[in-house]
Amino acid sequence: MGIRRETATAKTIRIGLPRPSGHLAGQYYVVRLTAPDGYTASRQFSVASAPDGSSEVEITVERLPDGEVSPFLTDELRPGDQLEVRGPIGGWFVWPGDSPAVLVGGGSGVVPLMAMLRFARRNGTAHLVRLVVSVRGPEALYYADELPGPETTIVYTRHGPASEARPPGRLTARDLPAPPVGGLTYICGPASFADAASDLVVATGTSVADIRIERFSPTG
């Protein structure tokens, strides 16, 4: 197991599994913690790493102050500790890697989309994907050293770096690429973001049938 910091409140955890995961880009694992008194708490965490046939996967966990699982994973977990995990799970919000895709993420919703981007870059098919990430500011951006590239657009909603040409503000239809011909659009983030982003995506001409949405609520 390995742990690295992404932001002041989020860490990426590399988990070693008994056998290759066989996960698809966009799937998730369930992590279950058991207290000494037998109380258990489980949460779902998207896989951030690309499918590569290995027996390791990475999840990125945002610490929520009132959470039951995320504070332990971000504050107390140490390399060498064991976790109880179940997965991979999910078949709707997955990208097979061989068709065009537009990826739209809000905040920590970038995690499963990062798995898709990494998959495309590793396989030499990065031209198939366009990723748009909406984030409050540079300090809140996950994978800051890896994510930027010709396939990605970062939209800062509150404040951005001095070199950023786009003024800070909410995501608009102008920030989105054209609909992927013969492909799908994947939207992931908090429910309010996902709903607003889906309206913007439809405004670009994308059919509702070609949109995959994954919403999450702040339960950690």
Image (cartoon, helix red, strand yellow):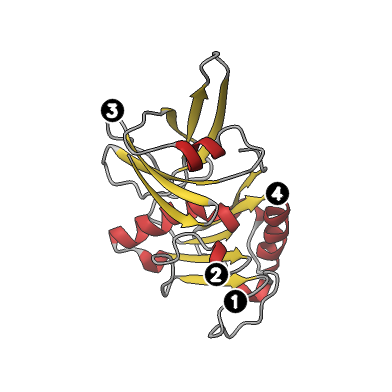
From the image, tell me which residue sits under label 3.
18
Mark nearer the N terminus (1 vs 4): 1
Secondary element at tag 3: loop
Is residue 177 in sight in this rendering? no
Q: Nearer the viewer, mark 2 or mark 3?
A: 2
Quadrant assignment for the C terminus: top right
Residue at position x 28%, y 28% in the image: 18
* Mark count: 4
Disc 2 to disc 4, C-alpha distance: 22 Å
Instruction: State the CA–CA distance, disc 1 to disc 3.
Output: 42 Å
Mark 2 residue crowding within 10 angstroms, few (<14) / some (14–19) / many (20+): some
* Callout 1: SS: loop
Q: Which residue is mark 2?
A: 138
- Disc 3 residue type (three-letter): Pro
- Please identify, in this view, whether the residue under mark 1 or under mark 3 is nearer the observer: 1
Q: Are marks 1 and 2 in contact (CB under 8 Å)?
A: yes
Question: Disc 2 vs disc 4: Cβ atoms closer than 8 Å?
Answer: no
